[in-house]
Image (spheres, rainbow, N blue to C red):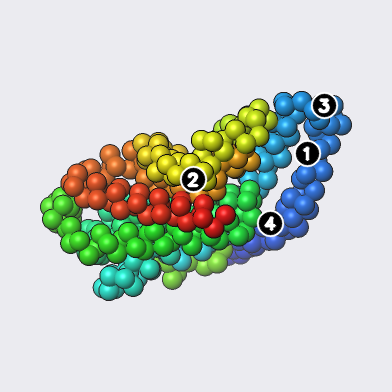
Amino acid sequence: MFRKIEEKSLLSRVISNKIIIPILLLPVWFLLYHYLQNITDWIVFDLIGMDKTMHLTGAVSFFIFEVPKVLMLLTLIVFAVGIVRSYFSPERTRKILGGKKLFVGNVLASFLGIVTPFCSCSAIPLFLGFVESGVPLGVTFSFLIAAPMINEVAVVLLFGLFGWKTALLYMSTGLLIAMISGFIIGKLKLEKYVEEWVFNVKVGDNGLEDEKLTFSDRVSMGYDAIKEIVGKVWIYVVLGIAVGAGIHGYVPENFMAGLMGKSSWWSVPIAVILGVPMYSNAAGIIPIVQSLLEKGASLGTVLAFMMSVIGLSLPEAIILKKVLKIQLIIVFVGVVAVGIIIVGYLFNFIY
């Protein structure tokens, strides 16, 4: 009896610690984030003693400041989104999307893409589950487009590096691309280009009822999200910022204006064509985008490049080939690419 009481007491302490630790760490996080620039200046100029006039100094300062800044933002937001994501299991998501009219389903699927896996390849298993369970094809494509393009990693990095206005505008246009592209694909009635075996697979329930999860369970899922996502992407963050630091320190001012500036009308479609065969997640590409902008590239062109790299990728197309015929893959890539090009020109016109 006493042993059971001790076990319950230990379990209560563990649960309590899971919830209390983030609350205690939050003020420390804000304090460190607030003084990060001062800490960076002290390390670069006082501790290392670097010369402000050197190109290397600019690159090193950029790297030392941006790496902890981005990783701190990423950890905080991924933890919060991990808790939110616990309310949207694959089964619940399928139930939400199932039976919805085309445009309503496109809107819902696009918004649900925000709280799902952070890259296109990891979103594909959920995409397949939706197709197999009878969710309309156009709706599933809205989800597939939104999931990698508009997620916590992309939004956090854009907010941290460019500010909330750019992050909000990117998220809005990304959602619009996902909704409209999925709607168009749905209207084209392209189900005949889905492999027949997909519709014959019956999706079962995994038995996990998220209604039974306690808040402590959801906090644990927040910790798991940090391990899974930050644990996977931190190296891309570091490498991306390292490349960005090199551009920041050594590429001459306005060098990129001639290649990716507003005056080059062809820069947006070329950026998209170059981006489609590439593959990266937001963590790897956004720090490079920031440095390109600082050197004179236009916002619309670099965001179009970023969207095509994140939202359309060669590995994604290879995986999709297992379940979709080539005609549908071409339509998917074409529709999304046109949407991205329009957004690129729109950003260049506004900015």
Residue 233 pos. (x, y %): 52, 41
| Secondary element at tag 4 | helix
Residue that carries the numbered disc 1 in the rendered image: 40
- Earlier along the polypeptide chain: callout 3 or callout 4? 4
Viewer-side residue, 207 vs 272: 272
Q: Answer few, some or many: residues within 10 Å of disc 4's Cα (few below 14, many 20 plus, some between 14 and 19).
A: few
Which amino acid is tagged 4? Ile
Residue that carries the numbered disc 2 in the rendered image: 301
In the picture, measured across the screen, residue 248 lies left or right of residue 87, that is right
* Observer able to see residue 113: no
Residue that carries the numbered disc 4 in the rendered image: 21
The Cα–Cα distance between marks 1 and 2, rounded to whole angstroms, is 31 Å
- Earlier along the polypeptide chain: callout 3 or callout 2? 3
Image point 80% across, 28% down: which residue? 53
The answer to the question of whether label 1 and label 2 lie on touching residues, with beta carbons closer than 8 A, is: no
- Earlier along the polypeptide chain: callout 2 or callout 4? 4
